[in-house]
Image: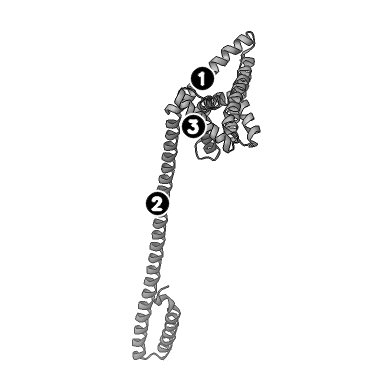
């Protein structure tokens, strides 16, 4: 409030006194008092104009303050939106970069070698399954192949674990001598556990990639829909092939969480497929066309 408005009660008191003086002057009827009345009226008019001007200026200042506040709020809101959009864009770029890195890893020479080895093994086991069970259904065939996959990997794993056997000082010397003699006599000779280890690592190299991707999906560090669209067949197919071996690894190590992120992602993909199938069947039934 302006000083003039703060003193408005004093002005009113002055005007009242001037009015009383004017009334007394009129009663007395002297010419000098009439002059004082005119002066009082003029002073009152000036005072009223000043009060109105102060009120008007105060209203203008208030409107200007409101306008400035709205402008500042709009500017702050725009800045927040710009910052939010920039953060969203940065997050999308980061996710896209991460997906590209994942795909680059998936398409690396080592990973392609692993996938080719798995595919070759699947074809061999499928041919063996056809000889063993020539007339079974496709579902039974798939179950049989997966069982053969687990049996084969379990055997490789058992041979590979021989390299982890406990050794003493004597066996260390024998092991060194064995390798030295092997190198001197025939460098091409490889011990059974070494051969099993190399082949086992080649076949299971993709395990680490799958677990990392599934981990990031479950922690919402990667968009689930994008990963499922790109790699759903990889998770469903390979986990189906190696699940029995994953179970063996869990039992051997006592770590029941081994490859848990991968198997959970595969279960989620299969559940979504089943849900979509139910929805499609329900639509067909509701349309009167039937499922078949």
- Quadrant position of residue 55: bottom left
Nearest to N terminus: mark 1 or mark 2: 2
Picture coordinates of residue 79, whole percent (x, y): 40, 51
* Disc 1: CA contacts within 10 A as few (<14), some (14-19) or many (>=20): some
Nearest to N terminus: mark 3 or mark 1: 1
Say whether residue 275 is visible.
no
- Vertical side of 24 occupied by 214: above or below: above
Q: Could you tell me which secondary element the residue under label 2 belongs to?
A: helix
Picture coordinates of residue 76, whole percent (x, y): 41, 54
Picture coordinates of residue 106, whole percent (x, y): 46, 29
Name the quadrant of the C terminus. Answer: top right
Q: Look at mark 1 in the image and give the residue it sits on.
A: 119
**Alpha-carbon distance for marks 1 and 2?**
54 Å
Q: Could you tell me which secondary element the residue under label 3 belongs to?
A: helix
Q: Could you tell me which secondary element the residue under label 1 belongs to?
A: helix
Q: Which mark is residue 40?
A: none
Please name the residue shown 54% across and 35% down the image. Answer: 173
Mark whose residue sits in front, 1 or 2: 1
Which colour assignment does the render follow? one colour
* Disc 3: CA contacts within 10 A as few (<14), some (14-19) or many (>=20): few
Please name the residue shown 55% across and 18% down the image. Answer: 122
Q: Look at mark 2 in the image and give the residue it sits on.
A: 79
Q: Look at mark 3 in the image and give the residue it sits on.
A: 226
Left or right placement of residue 287 versus residue 180 in this view: right
Say whether residue 9 is visible.
yes
**Alpha-carbon distance for marks 3 and 2?**
31 Å
* Disc 2: CA contacts within 10 A as few (<14), some (14-19) or many (>=20): few
Picture coordinates of residue 150, whole percent (x, y): 61, 23
Instruction: Check contact, mark 3 vs mark 1: CB within 8 A.
Output: no
- Vertical side of 193 occupied by 18: above or below: below
Front residue of 292 and 268: 268
């Amino acid at each position: 409030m302006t000083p003039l408005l703060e003193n408005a009660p004093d002005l009113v008191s002055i005007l009242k006194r001037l009015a009383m003086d004017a009334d007394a002057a009129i009663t007395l009827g002297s010419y000098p008092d009439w002059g004082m009345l005119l002066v009082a009226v003029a002073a009152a008019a000036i005072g009223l104009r000043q009060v109105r001007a102060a009120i008007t200026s105060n209203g203008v200042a208030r409107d200007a303050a409101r306008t400035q506040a709205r402008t500042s709020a709009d500017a702050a809101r725009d800045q927040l939106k710009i910052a939010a959009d920039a953060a969203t864009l940065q997050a999308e770029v980061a996710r896209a970069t991460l997906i590209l890195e994942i795909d680059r890893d998936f398409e690396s020479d080592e990973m392609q070698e692993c996938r080719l080895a798995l595919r070759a093994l699947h074809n061999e086991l499928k041919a063996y399954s056809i000889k063993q069970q020539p007339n079974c259904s496709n579902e039974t065939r798939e179950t049989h192949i997966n069982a053969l996959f687990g049996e084969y990997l379990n055997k490789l794993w058992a041979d590979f674990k021989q390299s982890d056997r406990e050794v003493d000082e004597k066996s260390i010397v024998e092991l060194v001598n064995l390798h030295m003699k092997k190198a001197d006599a025939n460098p091409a000779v490889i011990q059974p556990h070494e051969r099993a280890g190399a082949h086992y690592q080649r076949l299971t190299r993709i395990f680490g990639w799958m677990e990392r991707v599934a981990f990031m999906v479950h922690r919402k560090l990667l968009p689930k829909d994008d990963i499922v669209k790109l790699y759903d067949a990889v998770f469903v197919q390979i986990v189906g092939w190696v699940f029995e071996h994953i179970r063996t690894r869990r039992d051997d190590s006592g770590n029941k969480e081994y490859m848990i992120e991968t198997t959970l992602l595969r279960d989620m993909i299969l559940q979504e497929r089943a849900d979509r199938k139910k929805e499609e069947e329900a639509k067909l039934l509701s349309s009167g066309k039937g499922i078949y």
